[in-house]
Every structure is written in C-alpha cells, then in structure tokens.
Amino acid sequence: MTVEVLTVVPEDSPGRGLLRYHNEQSGCTFLVAGPRAQPALWKRYLDGALGVYRHFGVESALRYDAVRDGGSTPLFFTAIDPSGEMVAGVRSQGPYTSVNQVHELSAWQGFAGATDLRLVIANRIPAGVVEAKGAWVARDAPHRSALSAAISRIALHGTRLLGARYGFATVGSFTVERHRASGGRRDAAAPAVPYPDERYQTVPVWWDTRTYRTFAEPSQRQLIRSEQRALGLPPTRRPQPCRRRSFGMRTRHRDG
C-alpha cells in the first residue's frame, strides 16, 4: 500500500486549490477541492453522479438542482483513473449548525425513531457534524470494490478537513458492512426506512474521528492513516480507556 505525498497545486494554475493522493488499490488519484475553486471538476462530478443515480432511478435523492451551484458543498472528492476518466466521487456538506439542515431526515418522518435520531444529531452538532452525500462509483469502473471502500473512508477525511468530529451518512442497508470496515457504525436509534423508494432500505451511519479505530478493520485503519497523512492531517489521538473512580464506579462517556 502506498499513498503519494501531499501535493497542493499552486493557486495560479488550472489546478488551483486541489489536494490529491494516489490509492494503489484502485489505481486512482483522488482530487479534493471546493466547487467554486474547481467549477469544471465539480460539473464532471455532478454529471457522473447524475448518470449513476439516473440509471438506478433514484436521481431525486441527488437533489441535483438544489446542489449544482456548489453553495452547500465546501468540499468534494473525485477519483480519476490512469486514463483521466472520473470514476467515483462524493461530496462533504457541513459542518451543520442546525438539525433542519439534514435534508434526509425527512425520510424518517412518521417512523419510530425519528425523534431519537434528531436528538442524536442535535447533541453532536456542537462538536461538528459533516455529512457525506452524493456518493457514486461508475458501474463499469475496474476495481469497484476498492473504489467503494475508498469512498467510505472519505467520510472521515471530509469530516476532519472541515474541522468536525462526526461524519454522518444515510446509506443503503446492504452497504453497512463496507462502512463498518472503515469505522462507521449504524445508528440503532433509527430503523431502516424505504428511501428513496420502496426498493431500498436506508439507515443512518456515523463515523467518530476520535474512536473509529476501535471499529475499523486493520487494513482500513492503515489506509485511513496514510491518506490523512497525505492530506496534511495530523494523527488523531487514540481514545483513552475508561478508568474506574476510587469508589468503584465507571465514569460515563458523553458525546461531544
């Protein structure tokens, strides 16, 4: 496993504002930028996402018209294969300041657990919540499994780059194991819901930048560490084990 050393493209070049790293497993270079710094790259990301979502008949979940101006997206990630084709992408939205900014919460309206999920998000917003949205992988891309795993790791990268603690995503239930491998944990407070339509069961997943190593697979922990080093992010501190008080009771862990 190798990841290229961080490269920041000069501001006066066509690649201004870009971070990049190379992932050997997929053979792709991942580019990180803001939509307004890289409008052409942003359009390619949106076009790729729209094509994939439209193929599966779920383009409504992309909310293309609402996000295409880039104003709600501080960062997006794209995977470029050796031929120069864009084969995957995901965007980071946040950090949120209000629960009402989490659009996908509407999918839980009327279901048990909706209030609990809103409360969990509200409690974590002070520590920073960044949502991974609009993820896609080209259907004909080689190494789709490696690309999908790389997209899952980006939930942590985008969260840290934006200075937040918690990564969040609403995902198809069939992808939960993939996200668990990168340290994501399904939120048990909310049931699976039929979203964006009855063909899919969608669940909320969280990544905690302080504790993900406890749950991530060793190979994914190594890749996360290498990719974040390439992005110029310092190592995260390992969580401290819970200590007993002198009178024999465990201390309580509190989010945030």
Image (cartoon, helix red, strand yellow):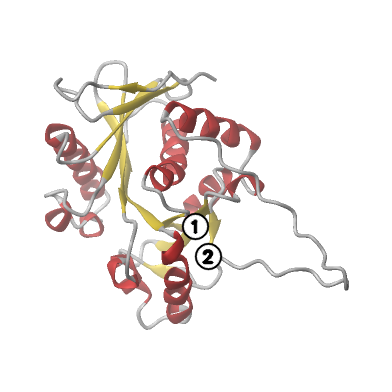
Q: Are marks 1 and 2 in contact (CB under 8 Å)?
A: yes
* Residue found farthest to the top: 83
Q: Which mark is residue 187?
A: 2
* Amino acid marked by disc 1: Trp
| Lower position in the chain sequence, tag 1 or tag 2 | 2
Task: List x then y, in percent, for residue 22.
Answer: 40, 22
Count of all numbered marks drawn on residues in the image: 2
Q: Nearer the viewer, residue 34 or 89?
A: 34
Q: Secondary structure at mark 1?
A: strand
Regarding residue 138, the answer to whether it shows in the image is no
Identified at 46% across, 76% down, the residue is 119
- Depicted 160 relative to depicted 123: above or below: above
Task: List x then y, in percent, for residue 215.
Answer: 63, 49
Task: List x then y, in percent, for residue 70.
Answer: 16, 48
The residue to which callout 1 is attached is: 206
Asked whether, in this view, residue 194 is left or right of residue 34, the answer is right
